[in-house]
Image (tube, grey):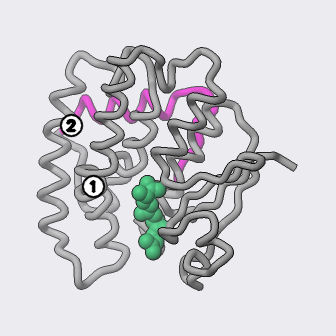
Amino acid sequence: MSAIKLYRHPLSGHSHRVEVILSLLGLDAEIIDVDLKAGAHKKPEFLAKNSFGQVPALDDGDVTLSDSNAILVYLASKYDTERTWYPEDLTDQAEVQRFLSVAAGKVAFGPAAARLVNVFGAGLDHDAAIATAHGILIELEAHLNGRDWLATDLPTIADAANYAYIAHAPEGDVSLENYPNIRAWIERFESLPRFIAFEKTPVGLCA
Ligand SMILES: N[C@@H](CCC(=O)N[C@@H](CS)C(=O)NCC(=O)O)C(=O)O
């Protein structure tokens, strides 16, 4: 049995970014589904892993971590011997962090929120989420002009963090038709060796 355990939900983009990095780094992990519908993430056993009661969480031997971006930093720092996924150069690191913040902020409240609205339905403002999504997509489209990857010349955890919610934005009625640079970036990411896809169904409990 693997020493690494990932606690996730199969429709969670936050979980997918960890899953995909584990795979891209060639790391074996035991995948444990957390039943959000049954409230398993708010039970003491899971709260001991993440007091915020959210997936993903990760065990690596004696170490328990939560928050997807924090987990990405940990895995890439510990296991990527080439240090390309989370570079050691401080300027590159800052650029990676900049795009991890985009993934946690603008992307979470735009493309991810639009998909979430389609999952949860009423009570959330779909049009506002779609408008926010296009705002960040316009910025990313310009940023990717002449660039293959978000933060450095090579793929980094910043690409992994932003990938799932942007690639699946159409499930939240956010079309990617007008964003050729973003579509090319998605294709490049999906062509990486050992890339694993995220479930495409928009029906679920989690953005
Ligand atoms: N900042 C957290 C956010 C994680 C998050 O939003 N997880 C969602 C699933 S995608 C969750 O567990 N939601 C259940 C809840 O908040 O009760 C991370 O990056 O891991």
Circle on res. 179: 2
Say left or right for 177 vs 14. left
> Does residue 203 appear anywhere in the picture?
no
| Mark 1, secondary structure of its residue | helix
Circle on res. 140: none
Which residue sits at x=63%, y=39%?
22
Which quadrant would residue 34 be assigned to in this image?
bottom right
Q: Which residue in the structure is indicated by mark 1?
A: 111
Say which of 85 and 52 sits in front: 52
Q: Say which amino acid is labelled 2.
A: Tyr
Residue 79, image x and y in percent? 66, 28
Q: Is residue 194 magenta?
A: yes
Residue 207, image x and y in percent? 40, 64
| Mark 2, secondary structure of its residue | loop
Magenta-highlighted residues: 179-198
Q: Say which amino acid is labelled 1.
A: Pro
Residue 20, image x and y in percent? 57, 42
Near mark 2 (Cα within 10 A), the count class, few <14, some 14-19 or many ≥20, is: some
The reply to whether discs 1 and 2 touch (Cβ–Cβ < 8 Å) is: no
Say left or right for 39 vs 3. left
Q: Is residue 129 magenta?
A: no
Alpha carbon distance from label 1 to label 2? 14 Å
Say left or right for 110 vs 104. left
205 versus 181 height, above or below: below
Q: CB of residue at label 1: within 8 Å of ligand 1? A: no
Which residue sits at x=62%, y=24%?
80
Which residue sits at x=48%, y=68%?
52
Say which of 122 and 3 sits in front: 3
25 versus 12 height, above or below: above
Say which of 27 and 71 sits in front: 71
Residue 99, image x and y in percent? 31, 36
